[in-house]
Image: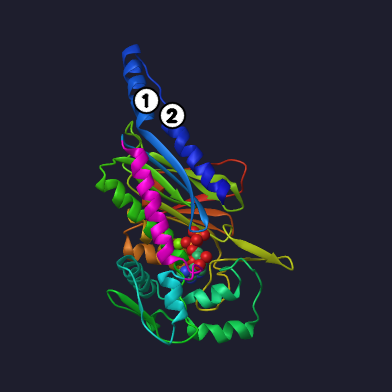
């Protein structure tokens, strides 16, 4: 996964430095522009929310803006972490079935978005799946295959309806219930960073929070950003390149976090209706959407849904685009996603299809 991010940013960065000119004058103007861009270009790598984050911004005050962004990331991590004892989420989980706990405005907002998404996706996305995620050992990285009895005993605790959210407090109605914001927290954090950039007057930026990519504006030379869509079978390689501007590109895939036991692979995206890692016939789902929180939540949800339901959901909503990579080696792009996507026919066995409607 780290490689994947590095690779994507590699392409983004490579794109930024590509200049070509025809006449000498134009060449000079371009060189001057390039020098100015280089001067105003700031980037940083941060470790937060259990992942590597890369931020790049074009602005004369880029250095201080990135420092503020870093503070915001750590601030949100302190609120959303499921393992940091003092976080809003950990407190909420500890007090499940006992008491309502005070939460920050940001936590209230994200919990509300998550709960609405459960309704919208008919339970494919459900942050109260946490007790099950924990039973598989994905929370503390103590991987183990739980028994069917264990999972059956935990499934009644998976119910977003049992979470009540007020403006400054929240409550889980049954003891043993818990929430895990892992499926949307990076997306939300991305949106907060972009809001900060906007406030500071940034017009061109690209950030990647553990593979959750978001782009602001275009590259300084006016051309779109390039983001690679990983080959889930060889994540350091890619199946194609997306050209985007002002858009989040978020991928969920079983290849991103998994363990193996007795020759079988178990990944971290759980089907809340069974308690088992989703086996929906998809290897990955990439969502393109102006809103990164939504892109993050939907990438998880559509991965659980599988191709047919995912495309049905896309037809019904139309506020995002998607690229699905299927277990039977097809890359399926919705028509809006296909517009900026160059499928790479290289040394992989995938075929490409576009869904028009
Ligand atoms: P990543 O965190 O690798 O980017 P996702 O955005 O798909 O991947 O989120 C997966 C994380 O979300 C899991 O690690 C777990 O914490 C949580 N999760 C797993 N299954 C679900 C689900 N069905 N709905 C909501 N959250 C989930
Ligand atoms: Mg997600």
Q: CA distance from mark 2 to mark 1?
A: 8 Å
Q: Are marks 2 and 1 in contact (CB under 8 Å)?
A: yes
Question: Could you say which is closer to the camera, residue 10 or residue 76?
Answer: 76
Please state which of residues 130 and 25 is positioned toward the viewer in this rendering: 130
Asked whether mark 2 and ligand 1 are closer than 8 Å, the reply comes as: no
The answer, for residue 186, to whether it is visible in the render is yes
Using the image as rendered, state which of residue 16 and residue 75 is in the foreground.
Answer: 75
Q: Residue furthest right?
A: 262
Residue 68 on image: x %, y %: 35, 48
Q: Which residue is labeled 1 in the image?
A: 34
Looking at the image, tell me whether mark 2 or mark 1 is earlier in sequence order. Answer: 2
Q: Residue at x 33, y 20 (%)?
A: 32
Magenta part of the protein: which range?
Answer: 61-85
Q: Which residue matches tag 2? A: 17
Q: Residues within 10 Å of mark 1 (few under 14, many from 20)?
A: some
Residue 213: x, y in percent?
43, 49
């Amino acid at each position: 996964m780290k490689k994947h991010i590095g690779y994507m940013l590699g392409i983004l960065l490579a794109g930024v430095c590509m200049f070509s000119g025809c006449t000498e004058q134009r060449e000079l103007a371009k060189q001057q522009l390039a020098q100015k861009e280089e001067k105003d270009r700031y980037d940083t790598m941060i470790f937060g929310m259990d992942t590597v984050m890369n931020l790049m911004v074009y602005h004369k005050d880029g250095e201080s803006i990135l420092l503020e962004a870093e503070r915001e990331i750590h601030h949100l991590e302190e609120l959303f972490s499921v393992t940091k004892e003092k976080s809003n989420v950990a407190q909420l989980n500890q007090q499940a079935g006992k008491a309502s706990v005070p939460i920050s405005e940001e936590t209230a907002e994200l919990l509300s978005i998550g709960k609405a998404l459960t309704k919208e996706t008919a339970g494919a996305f459900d942050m109260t799946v946490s007790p099950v995620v924990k039973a598989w050992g994905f929370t503390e990285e103590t991987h183990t295959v739980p028994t069917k009895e264990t999972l059956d005993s935990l499934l009644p605790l998976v119910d977003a309806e049992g979470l009540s959210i007020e403006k400054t407090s929240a409550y889980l109605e049954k003891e043993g219930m818990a929430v895990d914001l892992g499926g949307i927290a990076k997306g939300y954090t991305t949106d907060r960073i972009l809001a900060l950039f906007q406030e500071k007057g940034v017009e061109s930026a690209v950030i990647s929070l553990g593979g959750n990519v978001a782009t602001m504006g275009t590259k300084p030379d006016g051309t779109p950003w390039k983001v690679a869509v990983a080959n889930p079978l060889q994540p350091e390689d890619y199946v194609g390149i997306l050209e985007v501007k002002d858009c989040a590109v978020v991928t969920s895939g079983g290849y991103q976090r998994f363990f193996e036991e007795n020759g079988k692979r178990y990944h971290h995206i759980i089907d809340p209706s069974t308690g088992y890692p989703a086996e929906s016939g998809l290897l990955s789902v990439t969502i393109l959407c102006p809103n990164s929180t939504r892109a993050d939540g939907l990438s998880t949800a559509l991965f659980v849904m599988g191709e047919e339901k995912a495309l049905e959901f896309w037809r019904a909503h139309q506020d995002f685009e998607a690229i699905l990579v299927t277990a039977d080696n097809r890359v399926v792009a919705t028509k809006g996603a296909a517009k900026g996507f160059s499928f790479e026919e290289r040394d992989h066995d995938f075929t490409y299809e576009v869904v028009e409607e």
